Image (tube, rainbow, N blue to C red):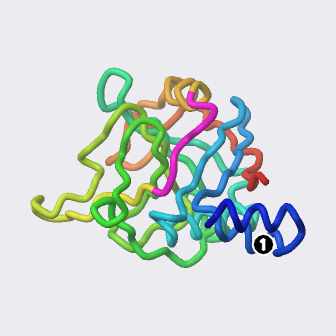
Amino acid sequence: MRRWVMGLALAGIVPPAAAQQASPTVMVEMTTTAGPIRLELDRDHAPATTANFLRYVDGKRLDGTSFYRAAHLGEGIGLLQGGIRDDPKRRLPPVRHEATDATGLAHVDGAISMARGRPGSATGDFFVILGTVAYLDADPSRSGDKAGYAVFGRVVGGMDVVRRIWGAPRSATAGPAATRGEMLAAPVRILSARRLP
């Protein structure tokens, strides 16, 4: 069906917007001072979270932000966090939580997921997974916060850039106590984030 709609769009029979809506994924390229990172967002499985991220992309609210946190959880395993750092001038209303046990997505190498406090509080901060970090997935058998984090896509180009940023020096003193030792000594700027055709 999607190929048929795309074919009609190419033939000029249906508007390109209709063909774009038929696509289950959206491509976004981030240009950083360390190099480009290309993302494939999964609006088929995580529509609300993808739409939220695209609000920041389309509104250019990620331009001039940074990757600022590199959590090392094992050999080659961890997460690289970036985004608005909860800047009230950039922040939009939070998005409803799409748990991994509902979406079928998982925190595997290259996955992109939303940072949050409580479920339903995610705004414009996100992280990329290095390796597999299964404990970030939803787990109904766990006590306390069982909802995990909301995966909404994956890196499809530039994982070498992600790993290079993740491996950069970290400050021993910067950041709140919960993330002490994980904050990058020199955050890497996100110059722009744009949808790709």
Q: Which residue is mark 1?
A: 17
Magenta span main SS: strand
Residue 183 % position (x, y): 47, 38
Asked if 107 appears above or below 49 in the picture, the reply is above
Dot 1: element: helix
Q: Is residue 145 left or right of residue 112?
A: left
Q: Residues within 10 Å of mark 1 (few under 14, many from 20)?
A: few
User: At x 70% / y 45%, what residue is drawn?
Assistant: 30
Looking at the image, residue 43 lies above or below residue 73: below
Q: Is residue 153 magenta?
A: yes
Residue 52, quarter of the rendered image: bottom right
Residue at screen point 43% across, 76% down: 96
- For the residue pair 196 and 180, the one nearer the viewer reads as 196
> Residue type at mark 1?
Ala
Image side of residue 69 versus residue 37, left or right: left
Residue drawn at (58%, 42%) of the image: 67
Q: Is residue 79 left or right of residue 27?
A: left
Q: Nearer the viewer, residue 66 or 178?
A: 66
> Residue 85 placed where, x, y %?
55, 56
Question: Quadrant of the image for the N terminus?
Answer: bottom right
Q: Quadrant of residue 79?
A: top left
From the viewer's side, name the closer residue of 38 and 3: 3
Q: Which residues are magenta?
A: 152-159
Q: In this rendering, would 140 be left or right of 108?
A: left
The x and y percentages for residue 51 are 59, 69
